[in-house]
Amino acid sequence: MKKKRLFIILPVCVVLVAIIMFAIFIIKSNRNPVIYGEFPLNKKDEQFLFGTWKVDKLLGFTYIREDDKTEYPTGQKIIGDEIIITKDKLSTMGLINYERYQKKEDNPEYFFYAIYNDPYFFLTSNRIDIDEGVQEWGIKSSDRIRILFNPGTFCFTFIVVNDEKLIFLMESSFFELVKERDF
């Protein structure tokens, strides 16, 4: 009698486990790769973002349009230049070789307008090879990428990776920034 129950219970348990695993797979595969909206900065975001940043290295390029001012294949000459991000000011006056990019915005309105739950979707939507994103940028499949709203008339984008890395998109060139000072 006990063996008979075991033969009935065991297959039922195996089927239930298979159904649960299939449901988890469906839920994970159906998660939205990007969410758009207006997402305010929290204290952790401010702690990460606010400070003086130095342009450290060129990461690569997205699709370059004919009217783009990207200096391919070297990118703009901004390595070593500074960008200041504080609660009260966003300044790119430290981009010394490019007067057209030298901007200062007082009391900027900061918020994230896109959250990429799938970093590979971010890479491919910006026409960046996934292998390049993994090897050169250090992007992992578990990374969360958020795009910071461009206040004022700024012509570039800040990309936050897990509150650990800040990427600066200027025209079609991606640069990695390194924090020099906190504010």
Image (cartoon, rainbow, N blue to C red):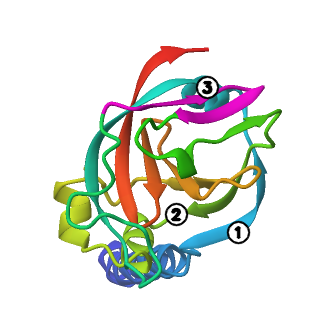
Q: Report how far apart the C-alphas of labels 1 and 3 lie in the structure.
A: 23 Å
The image shows residue 51, relative to residue 139, as above or below, that is above
Q: Which secondary structure type mostly characterizes the magenta part of the structure? A: strand
Question: Between tags 2 and 3, which lies in front?
Answer: 3
Q: Report how far apart the C-alphas of labels 1 and 2 lie in the structure.
A: 11 Å
The image shows residue 123, relative to residue 49, as above or below, that is below
Locate residue 2 relative to residue 133 in the image: left or right. right
**Residue stretch rendered in magenta on the structure:** 80-93
Of mark 1 and mark 2, the one earlier in the sequence is 1
Locate residue 155 relative to residue 143 in the image: left or right. right
Give the residue type at disc 2: Asn
For the point 46% across and 28% down, which residue is it? Answer: 53
Question: Between tags 1 and 3, which lies in front?
Answer: 3
Q: Which residue is mark 3?
A: 50
Element class at badge 1: strand
Indicate the quadrant where residue 109 lies: top right
Which image quarter is the C terminus in?
top right
Give the residue type at disc 1: Tyr
97 or 145: which is nearer to us?
97
Q: Dots 2 and 3: beta carbons under 8 Å?
A: no
Indicate the quadrant where residue 43 lies: top right
Q: Which residue is mark 1?
A: 36
Give the residue type at disc 3: Phe
Q: Report how far apart the C-alphas of labels 2 and 3 lie in the structure.
A: 24 Å
Q: Which residue is mark 2?
A: 117
Q: Position of residue 97 (x, y in %)?
A: 40, 41
For the point 64% across and 42% down, which residue is it? Answer: 103
Element class at badge 2: loop
